[in-house]
């Protein structure tokens, strides 16, 4: 449970501050007063402050949809700082929530081999864990890079599988990231004549595609 | 660039009010110095520096638009 402490002259002000920091409304807060001024008009002038501890009262109050919207806002703020005319929209594809970054068309948010896109995905995942835990899994995309990438991997898988059958021997892909390997494995899972496995150390491995009897 | 770093860092840590960012601008390269609360350093760096390198990647993309280079230093 995330909780913060804020300080202000009055309890109300402290609550407003806490709301701003936790990105929520007053109704969702559980407030605990740690230190209060003794009351009376004098304390107002003496500059003594009220300190409160606030935490999100019930995380289910903030629905998944709210969390997605806040994540979208966060991502949009980030991309706008890079490229002021960029924006983000939300869509659902195959049951996944996709945040699509609409840039200037230069692929600035994709980067070499989708590196920048992956960085956004990673950072947003971290922000989700930090602030919006009940948000569902989200995918960051830009200029439909993800679907193009999946298409190119599926066609690579098909090309290599026919090569393996022709050669009657094993063929290997280039070293790929876990999610990319998964796409190759899934594409060829239905093929009864072939078997696939990963080879290598660490995160980046090759996929070996081989006929079953060899 | 400074604001971008600050915003990302603030979204990642538990103590956003303790995030400090300084930018030393050069002609072609600028250095961004980021400091956060002691307990939050791990959050900024991440497992095997993954978070830090993701922030650097985003900064590189941003600086490409300005035709500059940016170096991120995390100060403890």
Image (cartoon, coloured by chain):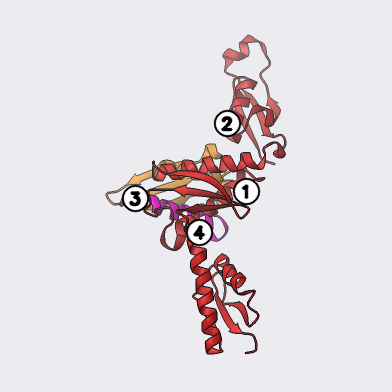
Please tell me which residue is depicted at 67% across the width and 45% down the height of the picture. Answer: A134
Q: Residue beneath label 3, please? A: B65
- Of the pair A118 and B30, the residue shown nearer to us: A118
Q: Alpha-carbon neighbours of circle 2 within 10 Å: few (<14), some, or many (≥20)?
A: few
SS at mark 4 in the image: helix
Secondary-structure class at tag 1: helix
Circle nearer the N terminus (4, 1): 1
Give residue A146's mark. Answer: 4
Q: Colour of chain B?
A: orange
Dot 4: within a 10 Å radius of its alpha carbon, few (fewer than 14), some, or many (20 or more) residues?
Answer: some
> Alpha-carbon distance for marks 2 and 3?
32 Å
Q: Name above or below for residue A202 compared with residue A164.
A: above
Supply the letter of whichever chain is red. A
For the residues marked 3 and 1, what is the alpha-carbon distance in whole angstroms? 30 Å
Q: Which residues are magenta?
A: B43-62
Q: Main secondary structure of the magenta part?
A: helix
Asked if residue B37 shows in the view, the reply is no
CA distance for labels 4 and 1: 23 Å
Residue where numbered disc 2 is placed: A20
Chain to which mark 3 belongs: B
Q: Which residue lies under the disc numbered 1?
A: A129
Q: What separation in Å lies between label 2 and label 1 (alpha carbons)?
A: 19 Å
SS of the residue at dot 3?
Answer: helix
């Amino acid at each position: 449970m995330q909780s913060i402490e804020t300080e202000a002259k009055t309890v109300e002000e402290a609550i407003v501050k806490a709301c701003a920091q936790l990105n929520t409304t007053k109704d969702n807060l559980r407030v605990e007063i740690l230190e209060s001024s003794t009351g009376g008009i004098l304390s107002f002038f003496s500059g003594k402050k009220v300190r409160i501890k606030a935490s999100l009262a019930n995380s289910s109050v903030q629905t998944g949809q709210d969390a997605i919207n806040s994540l979208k806002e966060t991502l949009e703020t980030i991309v706008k700082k890079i490229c002021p005319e960029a924006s983000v929209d939300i869509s659902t594809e195959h049951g996944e929530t996709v945040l699509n970054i609409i840039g200037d068309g230069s692929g600035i948010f994709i980067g070499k081999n989708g590196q920048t896109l992956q960085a956004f995905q990673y950072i947003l995942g971290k922000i989700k864990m930090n602030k919006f835990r009940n948000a569902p899994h989200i995918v960051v995309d830009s200029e439909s890079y993800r679907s193009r990438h999946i298409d190119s991997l599926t066609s690579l898988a098909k090309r290599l599988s026919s090569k393996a059958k022709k050669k009657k021997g094993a063929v290997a892909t280039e070293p790929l990231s876990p999610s990319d390997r998964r796409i190759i494995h899934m594409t060829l899972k239905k093929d009864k004549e072939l078997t696939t496995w990963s080879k290598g150390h660490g995160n980046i491995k090759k996929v070996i595609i081989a006929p079953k009897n060899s | 660039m400074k604001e971008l770093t600050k915003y990302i860092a603030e979204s990642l840590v538990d103590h956003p009010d303790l995030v400090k960012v300084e930018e030393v601008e050069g002609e072609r390269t600028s250095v961004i110095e980021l400091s956060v609360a002691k307990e939050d350093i791990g959050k900024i760096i991440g497992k095997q520096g993954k978070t830090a390198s993701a922030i650097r990647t985003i900064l590189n993309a941003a600086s490409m638009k300005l035709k500059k280079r940016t170096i991120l230093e995390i100060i403890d």
